[in-house]
Image: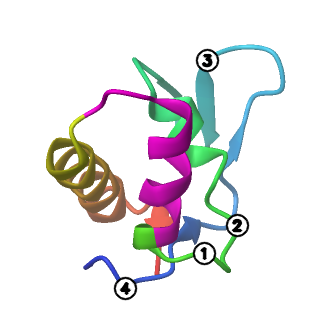
């Protein structure tokens, strides 16, 4: 995955409507920090760059490079688990 990839949640995965968990076929994943904010932006149309740019608008004062690394790292880990697909 890179900054031009267009990620989306894998089939069978969805955010719980009221709790900070991701529902997956094997159970649930607890979401920490801004993970829910990131995952809500995975619509299968926006690139990682567009997702990061959108996040940066809501997190004033955040370091751009750090946010890019963190978002890309999270999405890569979730892709390895089969939760996110590009």
Secondary structure under tag 4 reads loop
Quarter of the picture holding the N terminus: bottom left
Q: Which residue is mark 2?
A: 43
Q: Which residue is mark 4?
A: 4
From mark 2 to mark 1, how far is it between C-alphas?
6 Å
Residue at the extreme right of the image, as rendered: 17
Q: Left or right? Give the position of 75 relative to 20.
A: left
Q: Position of residue 74 (x, y in %)?
A: 29, 47
Mark 3 and mark 1: Cα distance apart in space: 22 Å
Residue 20: which disc? Answer: 3
Total count of labels: 4
- Give whichever of discs 4 and 1 has the lower sequence position: 4
Residue matched to label 1: 46
User: Reading the chain from its start, which is encountered first: label 3 or label 2?
Assistant: 3
> Which is more foreground, mark 3 or mark 1?
1
- Which residue is pictured at 32% across the width and 55% down the height? 81
| C-alpha separation, residue under disc 3 versus residue under disc 2 | 18 Å
């Amino acid at each position: 995955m890179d900054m031009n990839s267009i990620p989306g949640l894998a089939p069978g995965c969805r955010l719980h409507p009221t709790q900070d968990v991701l529902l997956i076929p094997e159970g649930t994943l607890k979401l920490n920090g801004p993970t829910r904010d990131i995952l809500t932006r995975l619509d299968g149309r926006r690139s990682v760059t567009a997702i990061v740019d959108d996040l940066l608008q809501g997190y004033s004062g955040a370091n751009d490079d750090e946010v890019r690394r963190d978002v890309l790292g999270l999405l890569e880990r979730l892709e390895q688990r089969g939760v996110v697909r590009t």
